[in-house]
Amino acid sequence: MKTALVTGTSGFIGYFVADALLAAGWQVVGLDSMSDYYDVGLKQSRLDLLEAQSGFTNVQGKVEEPGLLTALFGQYKPDVVIHLAAQAGVRYSLENPMSYFETNLGGTLQLLEAARAHPPKHMLMASSSSAYGANTQMPYQENMKADHQMSLYAATKKSSENIAHSYSHLFALPITMFRFFTVYGPWGRPDMAPHKFTSRILEGRPIDVYNHGQMRRDFTYVTDLVEAIILLIDAVPDYLTGQGKHVNDSLSPVAPFRVVNIGNSETVPLLDFIKAIENATGVDAEMNMMPMQPGDVPATWADASLLESLTGYVPRTTVRDGVTQFVAWYRNYYKI
């Protein structure tokens, strides 16, 4: 039976990844710090669902804790590592920058040192569409330059890509970095717009809409994202034999390292997303039109042709369907 080590298993995406692996018959070792960045009760509810399944081992701890990941790699000998633990949030990085350095950079370094000591067959590590920063050419394609990040959060994600590439080159570690595009769905984070909008709309409170509503996002439904991650497990980078095989390949010329977008390949106006929430809740939103927030970008849009070339799959859940499922979960979870 294959073993996967998944970091961030009490988190939004980590929960779904671990659940999908368990359903596929994997042994899953989950590591999470249960940080209080947002509602720990929500994290515990996700974790309870995982712990009720056979094959899941929970470890509580911080990815940046010296030696912890090396010990876990040595004990469990994971075939695959999926690294999702991170300090998230663009705006919070303005308030608590040190947590981003400690978790996103320190945690990445601890992970790579563990892999150096106990190499897995493949490591898949989360980055972000925010790595594209100030790029205005769209859709974003993995081979574009990404040198002008707009937030500290984005800078730590791009830095993690660079550090991972160096380890991949030096120690022949197969690594796939995936760049997420505005992931939403059931069990989503309370600090994200879908959760905040739905909460306020149902409570009859106004919602803050930044850049006066002139925002577009490539909204990606969480189970679509997870399916792509699971399929990428078998797309192990090999720079010695794999160059030129795939559309717009980002495979490094000097390392078994690749960057892959995971997005819906569609950019949706924020006001259309809000309209979908209004339709799903049956309540009209009162909107406070606000200026652009520091560190934010007006639009994101993924070119997912490399993902499709590697796996045959591209996320396709529409915003209408995804929002309907999210609102149904929200009403059930919060008993509304």
Image (tube, grey):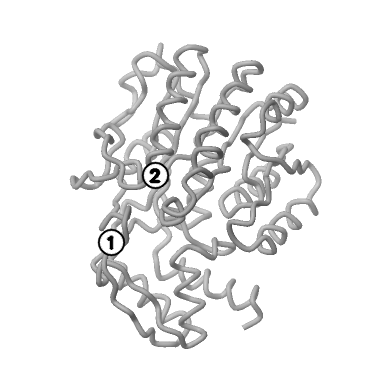
Position of residue 203 relative to residue 110, above or below, is: below
Task: State the image coordinates of residue 131 (x, y, percent, origin top left).
Answer: 35, 41
Q: Which of 209 and 268 is in front in this view?
A: 209
Q: Given the image, on which type of amino acid does mark 2 rest? A: Leu
**Sequence-earlier tag: 2 or 1:** 2
* Residue position for label 2: 152
Q: Is residue 233 positioned above or below 200 on the image?
A: above
Name the quadrant of the N terminus. top right
Residue type, numbered disc 1: Arg
Q: Residue at x 59, y 62 (%)?
A: 187
Asked whether the beta carbons under mark 2 and mark 1 sit within 8 Å of each other, the answer is no
- Percent x, y for residue 275? 35, 77
Residue pictured at 36% horizontal, 85% vertical = 286
Q: Which residue extends farthest left? A: 137
Q: Is mark 2 on a helix, strand or loop?
A: helix
Q: Name the residue under label 1.
A: 216
- The image quadrant where one finds the C terminus is bottom right
Report whether 322 appears left or right of 48: left
Dot 2, crowdedness within 10 Å: few (<14), some or many (≥20)? many
- Is residue 203 shown left or right of residue 334? left
- Residue 171 rendering spot, x and y as whole percentages: 52, 12
Nearest the viewer among 161 and 313 is: 161
Is disc 1 placed on a helix, strand or loop?
strand
In front: label 2 or label 1: 2
Could you say which quadrant of the image residue 68 lies in?
Answer: top right
Label 2, label 1: how far apart the Cα atoms are: 21 Å
Measured along the vertical axis of the image, is residue 50 above or below residue 191? Answer: above
Residue 65 versus residue 277: which sits nearer the camera? 65
| Depth check, front residue: 212 or 198 | 212
